[in-house]
Each structure stands twice: as C-alpha cells, then as structure tokens.
Image (cartoon, grey):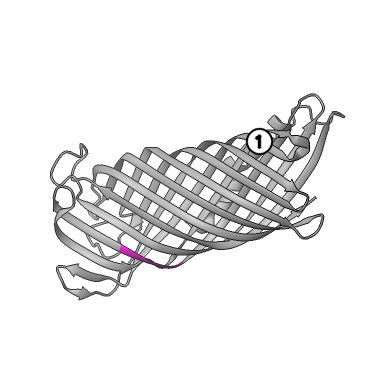
C-alpha cells in the first residue's frame, strides 16, 4: 500500500492541488509585476517515535456490553525518516505581501516497537478474555503536505507571518508479528504476520512564523489544525473465519489533527543552511464504522469507537536557497 501512494497522489489530487495553488498565488501569470523571489529545498533525515491505538464496540450503537470489545495498541514505534521540503515565494507589486507555496514529502521505516491485542467481555476494558503481546517493529509511514497563503513581512524582512490553507495525506502501514499469548497464558505462537494500513487525509488551516534575528540565523514555527477522513484496512492472517487480504475495514469522517513544528537554521554559506526541526502531531478519529468481512462472504458492522495517533520527531537537514 505504501509503495503506491507517490504515483497515486502525484498523478491525481496532489498534482491538481499544486496547479491550483500556483494559479491562486500567481493569477496574473506573465505580467511584469510577478517575480519569483526565492525558492528553497530542504533535505532532512531524522528519528521519530509514534504511538497508535484503536478500539471497537460490540454493536453499532456502542451501548451494548462490552462497550469496548477489542483494542489494538502499537507503542514506542521507532521510525527512521527521510524527507524533502520546498518553499516558493512569489512577489507582485500590486499586493503588499508575498505568495507562499510550501510542500513536503517524507518516508519513514519502522524498525522497533510493540503491539498489544486485547479482547474484553466487560465494559471499560474489564473481563479480558484474550490478550497477546506481539512485535510491532516493522512497517512504514508516509507523509505528504502542501499549502499556500499570503506571507506578510515586517521589520525589513526580519519577521514573516503567513496564514496557510493546505491539504495533507498521512499513511501508516503497521504490522503484528512474533505472537505471545498472555491471556490465556499459552505463550508464544507461530505464523503471526498481520497488517493494519491506515490513512488520514484532508484539509488544514495553519499559520507559519519565521524570525531572522541575524543574517546567519533563522527561527521558525508552524501550527496546523486538520480536519480529516480516516480509512483503514487490515489483514488478520491467522483468522480462517475472515477474508484475506482484507479481513476488515474501518472508516470515520470525524477525524481531527493538531500539528506543531519548531525549527532553527544556521547559515554555512549564502545559499546553504543547516537545519534542525522538532515536530509533534496528535490525531483522533471518532464515531466510525468497523466492517468485518467473513470467509463465507457475509459481512457485519460495529462501531469504531476511536483511533488515536501521536508522534514526536526530530530531524537534521540541509537547506539550499536559490
């Protein structure tokens, strides 16, 4: 699933979104008042740690016992990440601001982590009748984001403020392997190779701030509020009573995300800067549908109570300015 997103999104909504944003930022193309002020590309690598969980109810209403039937938790997912970002700034002597087009894509490889799978007979995570502690240290993540907006510059260029309208796509391809049953206490079991692929996508509003206290130092901050759709598919490979490769699917239209980024840049030449960025994300989807596909061809639905995702990362990079 992860390997197909670049061709899927660059040939579809991402390309259309980029074209629309460029047009909005530069509506009078070809006129003498338009000028590309600056373009920069940042290549970065870093480490992030993610937490992710979801749980479902026993029925669609969520009021039957147990109100939490099954819960999956991925903890301490260690991720090595690579990415590229770019900012384009366009000026026009007809307006008192710059046009800012910004975007980025990153790929992350999950190299460590744990997974817990729990099933309950009682409300509020009581009367656990099945639990396994498994290895979750495999898989990958993808993140794409584009945005545009006017950038207002003050104090001779030393301070910039840009309200942004954007679109983002985030994909998590998670796994569960090397099973160990703790309830009942059967111990390790073989053959576990389940997968869970989730997507968060939708528009966002944000604000980008940058401060340049000197010619060799720049500081930045970005804050984003996302309104998203949540989609997921899973393959529970040891369940003979379920279909494969899609054993169940989950959807939720009530998803939100908060993203915060802080950055610092140090000039090593007129066109090259060393960068350090810290990023935090918190996402939640609620009141969704979990559809189970049975091996006999039938399907059943229950309530997806919630899905939660939290991420904290740090990245080093090199920015080249043109």
What stretch of residues is rendered in magenta?
111-115
Numbered marks: total:
1
Q: Could you say where residue 162 lies in the image, as x and y percent from the top left?
A: 64, 35
Identify the residue position indicated by label 1 in the image. 161
Q: Could you say where residue 58 lies in the image, as x and y percent from the top left?
A: 18, 45
Residue at horizontal 17 percent and vertical 73 percent from the top: 186
Query: Outermost residue toward the top?
Result: 94
* Secondary-structure class at tag 1: strand
Q: Could you say where residue 99 lies in the image, as x and y percent from the top left?
A: 72, 34
Q: Tell me which corner region of the image, top left, top right, bottom left or bottom right, holds residue 46.
A: bottom right
- Magenta stretch: residue 114 in it? yes
Taking the image as drawn, is residue 11 in sight? no
Nearer to us in this view, 28 or 206:
206
Residue at horizontal 49 percent and vertical 57 percent from the top: 141
Judged left or right of residue 270, residue 196 is left
Judged left or right of residue 298, residue 73 is right
Q: Estimate how packed mark 1 is, as few (under 14), some (14 to 19) or many (20 or more) residues with alpha carbons within 10 Å.
A: many
**Magenta stretch: dominant secondary structure:** strand
Taking the image as drawn, is residue 224 in sight? yes
Residue at horizontal 19 percent and vertical 69 percent from the top: 182
Residue at horizontal 45 percent and vertical 54 percent from the top: 311
Q: Could you say where residue 299 lies in the image, as x and y percent from the top left?
A: 24, 46
- Magenta stretch: residue 189 in it? no
């Amino acid at each position: 699933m992860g390997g197909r997103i670049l061709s899927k999104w660059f040939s579809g909504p991402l390309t259309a979104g980029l074209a629309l944003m460029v047009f909005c930022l530069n509506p009078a193309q070809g006129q003498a008042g338009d000028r590309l002020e600056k373009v920069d590309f940042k290549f970065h690598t870093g480490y992030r740690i993610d937490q992710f969980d979801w749980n479902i109810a026993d029925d669609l209403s969520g009021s039957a016992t147990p109100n939490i039937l099954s819960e999956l938790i991925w903890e301490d997912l260690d991720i090595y990440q690579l990415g590229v970002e770019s900012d384009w700034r366009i000026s026009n002597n007809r307006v008192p601001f710059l046009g800012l087009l910004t975007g980025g894509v990153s790929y992350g490889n999950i190299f460590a982590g744990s997974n817990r799978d729990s099933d309950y007979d009682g409300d509020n995570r009581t009367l656990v009748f099945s639990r396994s502690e498994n290895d979750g240290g495999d898989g990958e993540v993808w993140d794409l984001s584009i945005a545009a907006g006017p950038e207002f510059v003050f104090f001779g260029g030393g301070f910039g403020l840009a309200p942004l309208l954007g679109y983002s796509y985030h994909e998590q391809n998670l796994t569960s392997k090397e099973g160990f049953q703790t309830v009942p206490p059967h111990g390790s079991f073989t053959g576990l190779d389940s997968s869970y692929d989730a997507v968060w996508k939708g528009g966002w509003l944000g604000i980008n701030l940058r401060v340049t206290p000197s010619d060799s130092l720049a500081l930045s901050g970005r804050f984003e509020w996302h309104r998203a759709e949540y989609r997921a598919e899973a393959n529970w490979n040891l369940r003979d009573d379920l279909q494969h490769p899609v054993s169940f699917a989950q959807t939720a239209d009530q998803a939100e995300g908060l993203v915060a980024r802080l950055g610092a840049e140090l000039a090593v030449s007129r066109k090259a800067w060393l960068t350090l960025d810290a990023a935090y994300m918190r996402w939640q989807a609620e009141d969704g549908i979990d559809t189970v596909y049975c091996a006999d061809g039938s399907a059943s639905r229950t309530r997806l109570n919630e899905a939660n995702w939290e991420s904290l990362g740090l990245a080093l990079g090199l920015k080249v300015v043109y």
